[in-house]
Each structure stands twice: as C-alpha cells, then as structure tokens.
Image (tube, coloured by chain):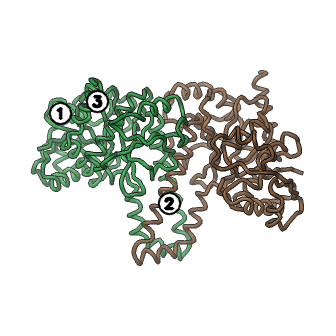
Chain colours: A green, B brown
Amino acid sequence: MIKLAIDAMGGDYAPKEQIEGAMLAVKNIPDIELTLYGDKSEIEKYLTETTRIKIVQSDGVIDMGEKDPIRAIRSNRKSSMAMSLSSVRNKENDGVVSSGATQALIAGAHILVGRMKSMKRTAIAPLIPNTRGSSTILLDAGGNLEIKAEYMLQQAYFATIYAREVLGVEEPKVGLINIGSEEGKGRELDKEVTALFKENKHINFIGNVEPKEVLNPPCDILISDGFTANIVMKTIEGTARGIGTILKEELSKGILGKIGLILSIKNLKRFKRRLAPEEIGGAMIYGLSGVVIKAQGSSKSVGFYNAIRQAANVVRQNVIEKVSEVIEGETVS
Amino acid sequence: MIKLAIDAMGGDYAPKEQIEGAMLAVKNIPDIELTLYGDKSEIEKYLTETTRIKIVQSDGVIDMGEKDPIRAIRSNRKSSMAMSLSSVRNKENDGVVSSGATQALIAGAHILVGRMKSMKRTAIAPLIPNTRGSSTILLDAGGNLEIKAEYMLQQAYFATIYAREVLGVEEPKVGLINIGSEEGKGRELDKEVTALFKENKHINFIGNVEPKEVLNPPCDILISDGFTANIVMKTIEGTARGIGTILKEELSKGILGKIGLILSIKNLKRFKRRLAPEEIGGAMIYGLSGVVIKAQGSSKSVGFYNAIRQAANVVRQNVIEKVSEVIEGETVS
C-alpha cells in the first residue's frame, strides 16, 4: 500500500475540495491509503467515505499569504501542513499532497522532510500544458536564486526520470530556456549548462529553446535558473489570464456574437480545461527524501485528486530511489 | 516637415506591404516626407502615389536570419537598411522605420546612427498590449546581457518621456519585473534598481511587478535586464501562439460549435487584433542619436503605417532631446 499524507486544511477551498479529492482518490486508486491532517470536526462534515482514509487531528493552518514561511512552519509544528510533512520523515507516510502556501511548503519540506543526501539543491517543477495535449516539466520555478550548472544537471536527471516513469515519455528531451536558439547564446551560466549537459549520458539535451515555443517546445523538460523559470511560469500565467479577459470581452459583443458564444460554450470550456494547470497535476518539489506535491492553491476536488494520483505514481515508480542511483553512480564513476 | 527613411526591402512581405504602408502614411500624416530605400524597379511596381515620397536606389537586403549582424551591416553598406540608417546620421532624415532583421538593425543603428552621447547603453522597447486596451512599454527586450542599475535608470527616463509624449500618459509609472511583489525580492541587480529608482524624482517607480500581471500591470513601463525582458517578451509570444492553436482546435469541434464559430468570427478577429503587436506599433531602439523604429518582421501595410506614425510622433515630440536634457541635467546636479 502507498501511504500518503493529505494536508486537508491548505488551499483556497479547503477542507471541502481536498476531502472530496481524497475520496475520489481512494475510489479510483486501489493501492493507496490516505491520512488527512486537519480539524477533525471540520473534516467530518465532508467525509462520507472512510475506506482507506483516516484523520489525524492538527492544530492551525499556515496562512496562504505568509510573509515569513520558515518562521510560520517552525512556530506551527502542529499545523496540518507541518504534521503532514513530519509524517513522511517519520516513515508513517510515503508522500504528501498540499494545496497550502508554496513558500511555506518548500521551507517546511526542507526542515521537516529533509533533502536527499545526494542532491545539492531542491527545486520546484510545475507541469505546464502544451499544444500537443501533454505537458512540459518546467524547472526550477521556485525562485531559487543561488544556482550552479551542476545543480541544474541534478535537476535535469530528476526531471528525466520523472518524465520517463510518471509521464511515460520514453526518451525525455531537455531544453535550456534561452534568448536565442543558436549555441553560445545567453549568459555565462547558460554556456556552462550547455557545456555540462551536452556530453552527459543520463540526459538527452537538445540545446537552447526560445520561450516563443513555450507551449509547443521541441522537448519534454524546460530548464533554467530559479529566477528565470519563475518569471517564465508567471508570464505564462499572466498572458493566459490577460488573453482570457480579452477573449471574454470580445466574444460577448453583438447579437450574433452572443448566439455564437452560447453555441461555443462547450468548446470554450474544453479550451479552458486544456490550459488549467490543475488538470495536469501539481508541482513536485525535487530533491527531498520524500515525495512532496504542491497542488494548486485554487484546486477543486478533481485537481486535488490529480495531484494525489501524481504523488502515488511517483511513489509507485520509486522515482526518488532511481534519481539517487543515478546521482550516486555519477559521483563514484 | 518630418523626414523619415523607410527601409522598403526589409520584412517578410517587403517591399509590397512597406510601400502600401508608406502611402497610407503620407495620406494620413500631413507633416511627413518619406524616402524609400530599395530596388527602384521593384518599388515602382507598387508605388501609385508619389506625393512626399521619393525613392533612393539601394543594393541588397540584410537577410532576416543573418547570423553575424555586425558583419552583415559592415559588408552591405549599400543595403536598404544600411542606407536608411546612414541617412539619419547625415541629417538627411530624422528617423528610420524598418521591418528588417532585429539584431542587424540594432547593430547597424549603433554603427551607422550612433549613440546619444549622454546615454550609456541602447535598449529595445517593444509595446505590449494590455487588457485595458492600451499598451505597456517593455524594457530591455534586446537581449543585452551586460547591464547595470544606472543604465536601466537611463532607460526608465527614456521610457517615461516616451510614454508621456507619445503614448499620452500623464504620469507614467515604472515597475520592476520580479519574482515577488514585496520589496527586497529578487537578485542583487533588482535590489540595486529598487534602491536607485525609489527616490528618483524623474520617474514614478511603483516597485516590483510579478509577470502574472504582465497583460494588466499596475504600471505603464515594465523594466528588467535585457535577458529577463527578452524572455518575458518571448514567453508572451509563445503563450499567445500556443493558446491560439488550442483555441482554434477546440472552437471548431461539433456541429453546434462550428456554427458558433462562424457567428463569432467577427468577434474573434477583433480579439486577435487586440493581441497583435503590429496594431500598437513597432519597438523603438532607445539611446541612439536618431529615431529608429523596428516594425514587426511580419508587418502588413497597416502595421507598417502604425510604425511610421509612431516614428513621426517621436520626432515631432522631440523625445530624444527631452531625454538628453534629463540625463545631462542629472549628470550636472
């Protein structure tokens, strides 16, 4: 059985949507057991199915807008997020799924789950939709400013194994986000990455990728430093949001337009779903000694269920062990 | 009279669309005179109106995919782009509009037009559409890697004067592109920029702006280093393109959907126009001793006409002189 800790109290629509997502998960995934961390009386309002689900009482929630995430975690060890994370270190669970505050989850995971010994830095890897109907791994979206090419190489190993084992891509390709496609473009770091990645046998490096192909890239993994990748992620979000606003404004104009809009509702909903990040799963934090998945803060039940399914897949495929083997083999050879 | 040089041969649809754009311009803007640089016999095929338009024969075109732009310019001094640029240095014209290769135009402008004495670095400033129906200046999209906070301050002066004089914004606001909105976020450069911009009396600095607001920012000017802003520009482009692909695929599904699509065509066209960069004008190269506007490579006549109008406005409003005054006043005080 795969055992997962669920932070039932984190997220914009917690605990309702988290609990409904958890119930969907046990119904659809036979080999999982879930422990919901949260306010027992609140959880019991929504929990109508208790097969392979148990509740552990927690005390307090990490606020979504928390300014000092490290302090928030340290001073709220009984919060649903902290208790979920601690349960992984204590081997009570194999992984955690949380829709709680991103920075608090990253900080908490560092403190309470701990890093994989072999991996130098953690990274956060959201999945972004692409026009082919699958998804691209984006690294490192965590805003981590201190980066070296060798840390990025470890992240690329992780993403490659993740893509192979969880996304089912046979030979995952890695592209470096850059301002031009020719080799030699970009900053000193980009040149170091190219030199280091090019000859490496564990990854399939295709060189630079310009973000004008960001939703249809010639690769499965897009990598850059934590600042740049975070900017890319937020620019995608901002552009999609802005385009959505403009589309909504324009499509409702005129009588014919209004009729057209009504007839197109179903297609527009599907269009929207194809761009919704929660449809494709949460962001995994790479480099921890346990599986930690950050689901969207705005997750509804199906989105949260997708993140649970993703966590179960990562555990089932022994992704962390496989990454360790590659990195440790590297260090020895 | 405002005298503008037109690179008639640069661009995906040159010279036809460039010439039609030029004819639109003389028709609509009474105080301009245009000189078309290009192949005379080719130009004459399309030029049906010669009031305030003359032709100067050039020889050769700078290729759009040019790998070594500096060499391309140096070895093609008779090309339409090089001759247009040189005519500004020789005071035959007040400005240039070109849809030719961006990097060649930047390199050529450096060599053939020259920098403003007071400005330390050039920058390229595209206009990006926003959901409010106006546009935001993005700096520096040129991929210029070598940057200091003080160069960015000069660019912010330029953009502020441009926004006031050309876009008609009374008190233009400047935002720093960053991974978080709180002060202190980001890299060393971002902290230096914040310290330098905060107390400056020539600009109205509002602090950090996350790119999840990139199409609806709380400011008129978004600034970052040349690498980051280029990544932002290309991510907007890639996201818009990807969303367009998905929208097209989904909207044509089903019979009702197809009817809906037909009824929505007019609205969808207007939606597309609101996102088209050429609708709002070209990108100005800041920091030159003459006005150089880069129109989209894919410009059609109206887009190219918009870029000519923009160039004429910049000349008419004496933007370069006004920027010089501010920067020189700064150095003295």
Q: Residues within 10 Å of mark 1 (few under 14, many from 20)?
A: many
Could you tell me which secondary element the residue under label 1 belongs to?
helix
Residue B198 visible at all: yes
Q: Nearer the viewer, residue B226 or A297?
A: B226
Quarter of the rendering containing residue B222: top right
The residue pinned by badge 2 equals B244
Residue B120 drawn above or below residue A32: above
The residue pinned by badge 3 equals A327
Q: Nearer the viewer, residue A68 or B231?
A: B231
- Looking at the picture, how far across and down is residue A297, in whole percent? 34, 45
Q: Chain of mark 2?
A: B
Residue A141, numbered circle: none
Quarter of the rendering containing residue B192: top right
Could you tell me which secondary element the residue under label 3 belongs to?
helix
* Extreme-top residue of the structure: B333
Q: What amino acid does circle 3 point to?
A: Ile
- Looking at the picture, how far across and down is residue B264, in whole percent? 52, 72
**Same chain, marks 2 and 3?**
no
Q: Chain of mark 3?
A: A
Q: Chain of mark 1?
A: A
Q: Quadrant of the C terminus of chain A?
A: top left
Q: Residues within 10 Å of mark 2 (few under 14, many from 20)?
A: some
Residue A87, numbered circle: 1
Residue positioned 70% across, 52% down in the render: B99
- Mark 3 or mark 1, earlier in chain: 1
Q: Quadrant of the N terminus of chain A?
A: top left
Q: Residues within 10 Å of mark 3 (few under 14, many from 20)?
A: some
Compared across the picture, whether B118 is left or right of B90 comes to left
